[in-house]
Image: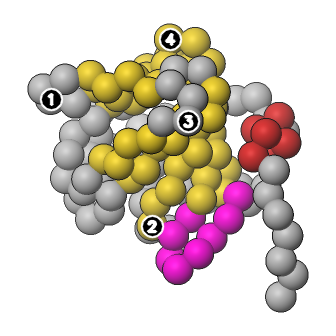
Amino acid sequence: MKIEKVNIANKLESFSDFWNPRVVGKLNGQMVKVAKFKGDFVRHQHEGEDELFMVVSGELFIELDDKTLQLSPGELVVIPKGVYHKPYATNECAVLLFEPEATLNTGNQINTFTKNNLEEI
């Protein structure tokens, strides 16, 4: 087994597309992912999985049923399973995600944003 450190900034520099998470680590049935967001995403929920969003750069907004969260670099939020949420970013935003391996990025919605086989970088 080869153990190596992961440089999040370098991983984020390796791609430029939006709403396409890449896997940078795995542990205990969980995946650590990085992604760039810009514009609107789809409102969705995950029936069986919680989802962690941590902002690396930029600002992320997550629209919930009763409020909108605004996250800045260094801030994170855990969206509990079953909670509808709609992430969006007015400008480019880099995010670290932590969620179970079975988590589909669009949750209960299948559309053009859906990514079934995530690239490992």
**What residue lies at 20% left-to-right and 46% top-to-bottom?**
83
What residue is shown with label 3? 74
Residue 65 bears which disc, if any?
Answer: 1
Up-down relation of residue 49 to residue 45 (above or below): below
The residue that label 4 is drawn on is 90
The amino acid type of the residue labelled 2 equals: Pro
In which quarter of the view is residue 85 placed? Answer: top left
Label 2: few (<14), some (14–19) or many (≥20) C-alpha neighbours in 10 Å:
some
In primary-sequence order, the first of circles 2 and 3 is: 3
Magenta-highlighted stretch: main secondary structure? strand
Q: Which residues are magenta?
A: 24-31
Could you tell me which residue is drawn at 55 percent across and 35 percent down?
74
* Residue in the picture at 82% in, 63% down: 5
Task: Give residue 77's quadrant in the image.
Answer: top left
Of the image marks 1 and 4, the number of the one nearer the N terminus: 1
Residue named by callout 2: 100
Whether residue 34 sits left or right of residue 64 in the image: it is: right
Q: Amino acid at mark 4?
A: Thr
Picture coordinates of residue 22, whole percent (x, y): 67, 50
Residue 56 to residue 108: above or below:
above
